[in-house]
Structure formats: structure tokens, C-alpha cells
Amino acid sequence: MTSSSATTPTNRPRGARARAAIAAKTLRTDRWWLPPLITVIGLSAWIAYATVRVFMHKWYWVEEFHYLTPFYSPCVTDRCIPEASHFGQYLPGWWIIPDAAFTLPFLLLFRLTCYYYRKAYYRSFWLSPPACAVPDGHTTYGGETRFPLIVQNSHRYFFYFAVIISLINSWDAVLAFHSPEGFGFGLGNLILLGNVVMLWGYTISCHSCRHIIGGRLKHFSKHPVRYRAWTFVSWLNVRHMQLAWITLGTLALTDFYVMSVAAGWISDLRFIN
């Protein structure tokens, strides 16, 4: 006697139609490969530029206007220019040690474990998967339960370090208004300030920040201040991807501008003093 749930030799329920035999990996005809390609090019170019600048060890400080590039903040090796070392010099000036060795690792880990960046480099560099309705480039998937991907679960802790680093960058931007000649204001100040604003936008739009502010609340009506903060962070959170890319641009722009002024390639446009 056969039950109503009996299956055919192909393990299909009776009456079910067979899956279409398609030789192609995907039937998508649009340029689904373009976003992953752009991501690879964009991130690779930024990483190449940042790596060269971090280990260049020069043209990071403008003494005349107290401009310090965020790639070297805080400058903590004994190779740093003393005036640029706002928090002291604690590390030896070996070539292999970045001058901002206390902050760069945490910034890197904050971005690597960021929910958006995971999606970006999983799809582009790892092809896992490269796009919707496109097969994964790997035959197996181990999840984020083993090293090194288990580190992704520490993103919430790297967020706290990112807040501290944003505070340091904000302090650098404030100090840049006070040059040896007194209060001053130039194009470099605008660039430094704009970079800090964008960095704060990216940092507090983080999913971890949103959860910290309101994720555990059961009654928003009892916490009106936190609710307003949560709604603001939620508004930023929708724009987290755009802010992630914008801050890569503002960081590179700020560093290149400070480098150009420090190297004497261009002069800073001054509005006051």
C-alpha cells in the first residue's frame, strides 16, 4: 500500500514537474557582474593608495597651519615630528611600524567587520555569491563560526574603538584652527572638518550603534530621548553604504590635500590668517 506522500524514483512528489535542465550558471542577461567589478577596482585602488601613504613616513604634517592627515593620527612613533605628536611618542620609529600604529589596526578591523563591507567584499572578492540568482563561487560554506571569519562577530567591540578614533580626528580638526600665527581658517580646515563630519556619520550609522541606542528597549515611550536618538541613527543607517564609500573618498582627499601642502606642491587657500 502506498501513502499519498510517496515519491518517484527521482525523489519528486507525484505530479510535480521536473526542474528545467539549464546548462548556464545563470539566466540573468543584465550586467550583474558590473557592481562586483566596480567594488574590486574601488577597494583595491583605495587599499593601494592607503598602504603607500601609511609607509611613506613623510608629508603628513603642515607646521604652518597644524594640518595632520588622518592616516597619521595620532602620530606615536619617535620618528614623528614632535608638534604632530599630540598624544606622545611611545613606539620606535622602525620602517615597518606605521606612525599611527595604535589606531590603524582598529580602523581596519572596524571596516573589515562592518556589515556593509562584508557584503561588498564577500560578493566582489570572494564571489560568495557575486550577485542575486548567480551561483556561489565556492562549493562549500562554513559560515562565520571558525577562524578567521569568527572575528566578524566582534564588530560591536571595534565600534567602540572607532568612536575613540573619531574623537581623536575631531580633536585634530579643532587644533588645526589654531596655527602658530593664532586663529586661522583655510581650505584645509574645511576639508579636515568635512572629513570628520562624514566619519561621524559613518560611525554612528553602524548597525551596532543602532542596537546599542535602542535595540534592547521594550518601551520606547518610557525612553523618549533614546527613541529620538534611535530614529536619527536609523535614518543614517539606511545610508550606511553611501557613507562607507563617501568616507573612503574623504579620507583619501584629506590625506592627499595635506600631503600636497606639506610637500609644497600647492599652497593652502586661506580665508582668515
Image (spheres, helix red, strand yellow):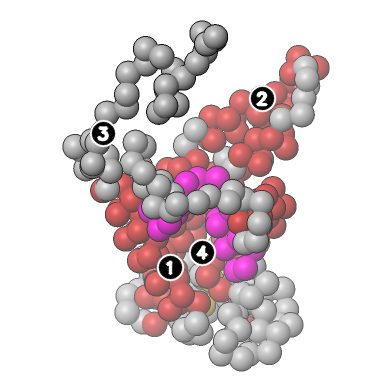
Alpha carbons under labels 3 and 1: distance apart: 42 Å
Is residue 126 rendered magenta in the image?
A: yes
Residue furthest to the left: 29
Location of mark 2 (residue) = 228
Alpha carbons under labels 4 and 1: distance apart: 33 Å
Sequence-wise first label, 1 or 2:
1
Query: Which element carries disc 3, helix, strand or loop?
Result: loop
Q: Residue at x 27, y 39 (%)?
A: 26
Query: Residue 109: percent from the left, percent from the top?
Result: 61, 60
Q: Which mark is residue 184?
A: 4
What's the residue type where badge 1 is placed?
A: Ile
Q: Residue at x 72, y 73 (%)?
A: 87
> How many numbered discs, if any?
4
Is residue 195 rendered magenta in the image?
A: no
Magenta residues, start to end: 104-127
Alpha carbons under labels 2 and 3: distance apart: 53 Å
Q: Nearer the viewer, mark 4 or mark 1?
A: 1
Query: Which element carries disc 1, helix, strand or loop?
Result: helix
What's the residue type where badge 4 is placed?
A: Gly
Location of mark 1 (residue) = 47
Sequence-wise first label, 4 or 2:
4
Q: Nearer the viewer, residue 143 or 22?
A: 22
Alpha carbons under labels 4 and 2: distance apart: 36 Å
Alpha carbons under labels 4 and 3: distance apart: 71 Å
Location of mark 3 (residue) = 21
Query: Residue 191: percent from the left, percent from the top?
Result: 44, 58
**Mark 2 neighbour density, 10 Å: few (under 14) some (14–19) many (20 or more):** some
What's the residue type where badge 3 is placed?
A: Ala
Judged by its main secondary structure, the magenta piece is helix
The quarter of the displayed image where residue 210 is located: top right
